[in-house]
Amino acid sequence: MYNMTHEKLDLEHVTRFIYNSPSEFKIQNINFPFNEEEINFRLVIDDEKDLKRTEWIFKESIEKNYKLNTKTILSLTKKWTKNN
């Protein structure tokens, strides 16, 4: 992303850059029946704890050979939340 823009606002809020660069990204809406608990999960990386959670999710996925999709990410996020 850094090589694509140097605007501070775009670097801080990458979604803004993605939406403003439709030729660079393919955006799709997906239907997924979230339950209330899943809606409240933090699936962002804003701080050190978020980064640790994300790294753990990827590590678990690789070690256990999980298919990395929304269902898996939510399941692992739930597990992480219970244990941390």
Image: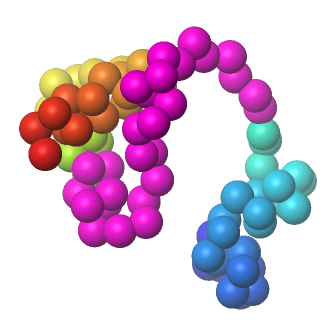
Picture residue at 77% right of the left edge, 49% below the top: 25
Nearest the eye: 29 or 80 = 80
Q: Is residue 52 left or right of residue 34?
A: left
Q: Residue at x 47, y 22 (%)?
A: 36
* Residue 54 coordinates in the image, percent (x, y): 32, 49
Q: Quadrant of the N terminus?
A: bottom right
Q: In the figure, residue 3 lies in which quadrant?
A: bottom right
Q: Quadrant of the C terminus?
A: top left
Q: Residue 70 at x, y = what percent? A: 47, 25
* Residue 32 relative to residue 9: left or right: left
When asked about the image quadrant of residue 38, the answer is: top left
Colour scheme of the picture: rainbow
Vertical placement of residue 51 versus 5, above or below: above
Using residue 55 as the reference point, say whether residue 69 is left or right of it.
right
> Against 83, is 35 above or below?
above
Based on the picture, tell me whether residue 46 belongs to the magenta stretch: yes
Q: Where is residue 68 drawn, in percent x and y? A: 39, 28
Question: Could you tell me if residue 60 is visible in this image?
Answer: no
Looking at this view, is 83 or 8 the one in front? 83
Per the rendered image, the range of residues in magenta is 28-54
- Identified at 72% across, 75% down, the residue is 10
Residue at x 60% of width, y 16% of height: 32
- Name the residue furthest front: 36
Query: Residue 17: within the magenta?
Result: no
